[in-house]
Image: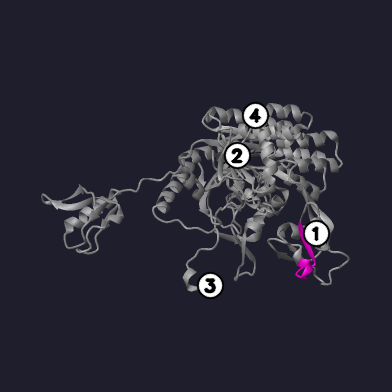
């Protein structure tokens, strides 16, 4: 590498500079305060862990996303976390134990080996909340509501909520009883709503006409809430699992519609995001005119199993960078007070200390000569008038 | 609710000539002739629909990033595209051709590890991986047929329409990797957030080309 471009950052790695770093930090704090006010306890898991504990129960996708290094102390393989959710599941199952519902939240950097191919960063700042130990729809409702509150707090409007349920696809797959490889292919087709290929696939694989009909209908079962009524007709007879999933979605959609009339609801029964580990309701939030989701989550009841305890779990996460950029939640550059160079006047020092104590931003001159820099956004200055140090309005 | 704005990314070239009549049949006519206009964004007879005219290989990129809500591009381009999910609900039944493996007539590769020249690197790798055969893939941007003639490669993987260019250069198709046609692709976020107009357009196109696609 030549000397000139040594300073370049790796591909899809970014840094945040003033004034955005400060504004993003404020947003992060506001979100963590919001989680706190809902009863979620903050955790701060380590950036690296042994690979086994990072990746168990999470599927192949996360494995490929994880940077790996050898631990020089133990010779074992460690991973730099690509997702904090499995760490939260480990902490719930192995560290904190206990049987009641537990609410955990986090904010921290993760690393991805690959960019998502859409110009996404490989070093997102993941923020999220997880609710363990409750299998009822109430916890799904709570987590989705908290996700929406988070987005509203980030200053986002024109929100769309996408709801799905991987239990429906799971139930249909059980009926279809396909070999593993064919199932993966079908999964890919459904995920891409590739109807021409799906038709060929269904024609080329032995399964009952009824099951084929259900699978053919699945990618079409999306739209506003009334699609659930259509789904009940189309998927009639597909079994108790499908019925229960549809009933769950119906109740959830009703409640969410009541509480968040400003959010547009969209259902997609073929949405299989995170199918590797999700077990029930899945959801994602979108904003009009934005090509990617802003926050996502769902139920993952079995991830804790490998740590010795299968705890029901649901949660959501988002990239704080993405929320910040979508939300335009920028605080106007806060003003500051310009104060003279530190000297021998105890009254001046006391005035500066008092102002900073009040939460004011006080910037000291470093020499008598260097005047009043305009780049520091000082809108006031500390001057000696009428026998005391006073703050005066000031336009540089 | 006011009708959401839809942006369609169309592939330049041969696919475009066949796409425009299809769009015209569902009532979308560009305000200017794309073949003549120098504009890259064209308004249409439908105020809420506009067109982007881009290279076929760029269509998935525009749609993935949300720069366009929908796009029209060849299945060959989609097969080669990695990363990110696009919906591909419709075969538009235009731009038909085949992606084939071709080589010199009556010649077996003499290298232990055959070389394949292609523009479709990922597709070629996947094809030979599925056959369990190790090959070296050489990326070229055009005139693949030349590669076997100067012994740059043993085989080529390329699109074939009539097969005339192959024959003219003494090559024969050995195997078909895929039947190719143009697909309608949709950004998943647009599908969800602009559901009504997106579905309306997809259904109208499906009806026009007469497939029993998702209504």
What are the residue bounds of the magenta stretch?
B147-158
- The answer to whether residue A339 is seen in the rendering is yes
Dot 4 and dot 3 residues touching (CB under 8 Å): no
Q: Is residue A33 left or right of residue B208?
A: left
Residue A174 appears at what percent x and percent y? Answer: 79, 40
- Secondary structure under tag 2 reads helix
Figure quadrant of the C terminus of chain B: top right
Tag 2 residue: B190
Residue B153 among magenta residues: yes
Instruction: Give neighbour class at mark 2: few <14, some 14-19, many 20+ (Cα, 10 Å).
Output: many
- Using the numbered discs, state the Cα–Cα distance from disc 4 to disc 1 in whole angstroms: 58 Å
Instruction: Give neighbour class at mark 4: few <14, some 14-19, many 20+ (Cα, 10 Å).
Output: some
Tag 4 residue: A250
- Using the numbered discs, state the Cα–Cα distance from disc 4 to disc 3 in whole angstroms: 58 Å
Q: Are marks 2 and 3 on the same chain?
A: no
- Using the numbered discs, state the Cα–Cα distance from disc 2 to disc 4 in whole angstroms: 23 Å
Residue A318 appears at what percent x and percent y? Answer: 54, 47
- Secondary structure under tag 1 reads helix
Using the image as rendered, state which of residue A151 and residue B81 is in the foreground: B81
- Secondary structure under tag 4 reads helix
Tag 3 residue: A1
Using the image as rendered, state which of residue A362 and residue A241 is in the foreground: A362
């Amino acid at each position: 590498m030549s000397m000139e471009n040594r300073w370049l950052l790796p591909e899809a790695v970014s840094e945040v500079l003033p004034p955005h770093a400060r504004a993003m930090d404020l947003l992060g704090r506001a979100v963590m305060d919001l989680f706190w006010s809902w009863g979620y306890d903050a955790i701060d898991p380590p950036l690296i862990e042994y690979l086994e504990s990072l990746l168990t129960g999470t599927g192949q996708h996360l494995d490929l996303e994880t940077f790996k290094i050898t631990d020089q102390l133990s010779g074992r393989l460690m991973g730099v976390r690509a997702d904090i959710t499995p760490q939260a599941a480990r902490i719930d199952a192995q560290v904190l134990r206990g049987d009641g519902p537990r609410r955990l939240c986090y904010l921290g950097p993760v690393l991805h080996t690959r960019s998502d191919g859409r110009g996404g960063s490989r070093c997102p700042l993941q923020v999220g909340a997880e609710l363990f130990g409750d299998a009822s729809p109430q916890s799904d409702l709570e987590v989705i509501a908290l996700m929406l509150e988070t987005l509203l707090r980030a200053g986002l409007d024109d929100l769309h909520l996408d709801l799905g349920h991987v239990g429906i696809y799971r139930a249909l797959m059980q009926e279809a009883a396909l070999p593993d490889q064919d199932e993966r292919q079908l999964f890919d087709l459904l995920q891409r709503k590739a109807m021409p290929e799906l038709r060929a696939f269904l024609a080329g694989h032995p399964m009952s006409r009824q099951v084929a009909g259900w699978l053919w209908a699945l990618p079409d079962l999306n739209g506003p809430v009334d699609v659930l009524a259509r789904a009940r007709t189309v998927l009639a007879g597909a079994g108790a699992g499908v019925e229960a999933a549809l009933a769950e979605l119906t109740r959830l959609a009703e409640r969410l519609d009541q509480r968040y009339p400003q959010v547009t609801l969209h259902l997609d029964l073929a949405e299989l995001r995170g199918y590797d580990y999700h077990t029930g309701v899945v959801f994602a939030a979108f904003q009009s005119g934005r090509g990617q989701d802003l926050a996502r989550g769902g139920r993952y009841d079995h991830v804790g199993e490998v740590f010795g305890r299968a705890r029901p779990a649901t949660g959501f996460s988002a990239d704080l960078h993405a929320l910040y950029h979508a939300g335009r939640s920028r605080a106007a550059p806060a003003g500051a007070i310009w104060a003279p160079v530190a000297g021998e006047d105890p009254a001046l020092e006391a005035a500066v200390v008092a102002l900073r104590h009040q939460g004011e931003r006080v910037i000291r001159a470093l020499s008598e000569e260097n005047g009043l820099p305009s780049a520091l956004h000082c809108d006031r200055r500390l001057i000696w008038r009428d026998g005391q140090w006073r703050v005066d309005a000031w336009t540089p | 609710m006011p009708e959401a704005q839809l942006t369609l990314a169309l592939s330049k070239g041969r696919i475009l000539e066949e796409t425009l009549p299809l769009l015209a049949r569902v009532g979308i006519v560009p305000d200017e002739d794309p073949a003549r206009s120098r504009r890259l964004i064209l308004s249409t007879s439908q105020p809420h629909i506009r067109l982007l005219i881009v290279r076929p290989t760029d269509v998935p990129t525009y749609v993935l990033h949300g720069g366009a809500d929908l796009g029209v591009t060849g299945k060959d381009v989609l097969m080669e595209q990695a990363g990110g999910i696009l919906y591909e609900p419709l075969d538009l039944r235009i731009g038909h051709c085949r992606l084939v493996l071709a080589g010199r007539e009556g010649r077996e590769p003499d290298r232990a590890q055959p070389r394949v020249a292609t523009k479709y690197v990922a597709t070629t790798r996947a094809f030979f991986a599925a056959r369990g055969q190790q090959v070296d893939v050489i990326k070229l941007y055009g005139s693949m047929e030349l590669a076997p003639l100067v012994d740059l490669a043993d085989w080529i993987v390329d699109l074939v329409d009539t097969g005339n260019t192959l024959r003219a250069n003494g090559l024969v198709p050995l195997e078909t990797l895929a039947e190719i046609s143009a697909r309608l692709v949709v950004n998943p976020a647009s599908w969800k957030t602009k559901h009504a107009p997106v579905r309306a357009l997809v259904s109208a196109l499906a009806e026009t080309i007469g497939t029993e696609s998702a209504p």
